[in-house]
């Protein structure tokens, strides 16, 4: 992870950027792909009783889906920069009560496997662009949960219930959770429950994307 962090700026000097959406040389996310992004205007998740507000920037399809795939599975950490900037722009246009940003944590085993937490990389960009403080560490994932994508709605709620805990001094009053993709909302809702149990007063969620036509 440290090596990747050191190498990344060096590589970006040596290798020209490729668009994470379509692969063409130039920018990390080219203008054409940016124009093809679809703003999310669908339903918000119903499993969100612990959340004050939910913001979802884009529909999870097309260039955005490709770009996120590049970030998560091809470990192109730099892709977090344009994607995080898009999330920051969405948050500025659709504000949430926010004293601090907290990324949805990965279980330590998953973190070791991937080498980084994509939600944290995105949250860092949002923090840098908005000036909101970022808190990483005290919100922990206690269990290595099954992949939510493999489960139905009831399974997803059960899978993440009590999977998170706040281990630290009381968090700021108003927290915005940051995640890459939001589907049922079960994960951010479970994080919000842990934060509220830890002392947070209001918890909201900001996600980069959500699929259209998924289960509520
Ligand atoms: Zn492109």
Image (cartoon, rainbow, N blue to C red):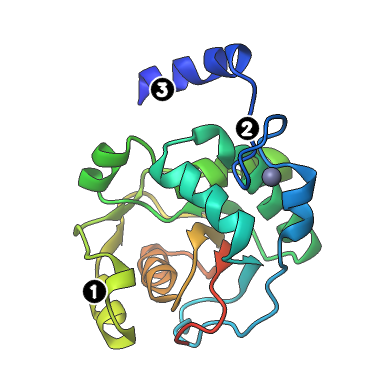
Is tag 1's residue or tag 2's residue first in the polypeptide sequence? 2
Q: Which residue is mark 2?
A: 18
Q: Position of residue 178 (x, y in %)?
A: 52, 57
Front position in the image: 43 or 53? 43
Q: Quadrant of the N terminus?
A: top left
Pointers 3 and 2 in contact (C-beta within 8 Å): no
Q: Is residue 52 above or below residue 11?
A: below
Give above or below for 12 relative to 192: above
Mark 1–mark 2 Cα distance, whole angstroms, equals 37 Å
Q: Which mark is residue 159?
A: 1
The local crowd at label 2, few if under 14, some if 14 to 19, many if 20 or more residues have their Cα within 10 Å, is some
29 shown above or below 39:
above
Which residue matches tag 3? 4
Q: Is residue 145 visible?
A: yes
Q: Are marks 1 and 3 in contact (CB under 8 Å)?
A: no
In the image, taking residue 172 as reference, residue 73 lies left or right, namely: left
Which quadrant of the frame does ligand 1 lie within?
top right
Q: Earlier in the sequence, mark 1 or mark 3?
A: 3
Q: Residues within 10 Å of mark 1 (few under 14, many from 20)?
A: many
Q: Which is nearer the N-term, disc 3 or disc 2?
A: 3
């Amino acid at each position: 992870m440290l090596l990747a962090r050191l190498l990344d700026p060096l590589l970006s000097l040596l290798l020209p950027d490729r668009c994470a959406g379509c692969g063409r040389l130039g920018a990390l996310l080219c203008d054409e792909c940016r124009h093809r992004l679809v703003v999310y205007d669908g339903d918000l998740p119903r499993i969100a009783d612990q959340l004050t507000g939910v913001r979802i920037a884009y529909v999870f399809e097309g260039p955005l889906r490709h770009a996120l795939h590049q970030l998560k599975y091809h470990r192109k950490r730099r892709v977090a920069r344009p994607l995080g900037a898009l999330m920051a722009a969405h948050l500025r246009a659709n504000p949430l009560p926010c004293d601090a940003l907290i990324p949805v944590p990965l279980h330590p085993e998953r973190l070791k496997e991937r080498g980084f937490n994509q939600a944290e990389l995105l949250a860092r960009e949002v923090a840098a662009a908005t000036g909101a403080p970022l808190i990483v560490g005290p919100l922990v994932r206690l269990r290595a949960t099954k992949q939510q994508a493999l489960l139905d709605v009831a399974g997803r709620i059960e899978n993440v219930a009590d999977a998170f805990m706040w281990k630290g001094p009381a968090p700021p009053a108003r927290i915005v959770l940051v995640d890459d993709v939001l589907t049922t909302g079960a994960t951010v809702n479970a994080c919000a429950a842990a934060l509220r149990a830890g002392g947070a007063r209001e918890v909201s969620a900001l996600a980069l994307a959500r699929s259209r036509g998924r289960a509520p």
